[in-house]
Image: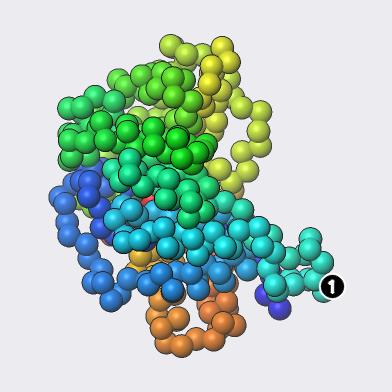
Amino acid sequence: MPGLLKDSYNRPIRDLRVSLTDRCNFRCFYCLPHGEPPIAPKEQMLSYEEIEYACRIFVELGIEKIRLTGGEPMMRRDIEQIIFKLAQLKDRPSERPHLAGGSRASCAPGLRDLALTTNGYFLPHRAHSLKEAGLDRITISLDSLKRDVFKQMTGVDVLDRVLEGIQAAKEARLTPIKVNAVIVRGHNEDEVADFAAFAREHDVKMRFIEFMPLDSGHEWNREDVVSGREIRERINERFPLEPLKVARGSETSSRYRFADGAPGEIGIIAPVTEPFCGACSRIRLTADGQIRTCLFSTVEHSLRDVIRDGASRAETIDFIESVVMKKEPRHYINDPGFVAPSRSMSFIGG
Ligand code: SAM
């Protein structure tokens, strides 16, 4: 009888990122610099029924967190429908005992956390319906607090609308709200402390992300990476930080509170300069149904084909377990022979 998902390095796999679409209404230069059209034809995209079926199996295999992403996930029609379906998987122990005896403790715990990453554009009118459908919390991308820089980085002139979206998410209690900023040299590193001030003022968890080689134009350059260390120093100069006394576990960010007790939190995600692969618990399902075992994988495994070819539930589980065993030990961004994945973050699902 299969157990909870673990890879060949004994890392438990508990976190699934599901891309709902590879379409996006923004053109962030670090992701889709040339504004390519989506590559997957509609019939190749997983339907909501297929996503629900796959997620139900993943949860039985021990996935505790599902994050819906994209592309821009809110461009997928009636996203509330799939949120509602997935929310039903919350806090329900697996019906399938994993150890002899089948006690509660020996079962997969069920889904604990259903989250969404969005650019915030659709939130002013939709935050409440997401909450009502069963979404727990939200992460909103915001790369600049200056209108001109926001437009230059994202390709769209909608800073005010995204700020409204953050407010709407707060009002809908999609909390704790995380705000993601990718910091890129020469664009927004001078705003790092301003983002910290934003976190204090609005009581949000600010997440600073190092620029990764996941842009579709493959123009990433190491000199453009603003290191986690520099980000910390820039904030510390204005707002002294203290590390949060919580075990990091498989979290992507190192987390800090403001030393003066102000609200808000800082998280620094530094996969380039401070890799955290040893504790990685993540796998990804792309909008066209490919399992990716690492953001930087150069191979994908078609769960869609397995499901559409009529595999039984047991065969599907075998497939997932065998794919997870192939999870890479680490990423190779810092190795001389590093080859960036051919698909950008927007196709992989950030
Ligand atoms: N459209 C949604 C959004 O804007 O949040 C979800 C998808 S987006 C690909 C998810 C996250 O990936 C965003 O916070 C984005 O800034 C980040 N991202 C995309 N390309 C990146 C890169 N090359 N390096 C670091 N982060 C990146």
Position above or below: 272 against 93? above
Q: Residues within 10 Å of mark 1 (few under 14, many from 20)?
A: few
Identify the residue position indicated by label 1 in the image. 101
Task: Count numbered badges in the picture.
Answer: 1
Residue 121 appearing in the image: yes
Between 201 and 244, the one nearer to me in the picture: 201
Between 308 and 249, the one nearer to me in the picture: 308
Position above or below: 201 against 43? above
Query: Is 219 situated left or right of 253 in this image?
Result: left
Q: Position of residue 304 (x, y in %)?
A: 40, 76
Query: Is 71 situated left or right of 228 in this image?
Result: left
Q: Residue at x 18, y 39 (%)?
A: 156
Q: Position of residue 279 (x, y in %)?
A: 59, 48
Position above or below: 13 against 267? below
Q: Residue at x 28, y 43 (%)?
A: 121
Residue 224 appearing in the image: no
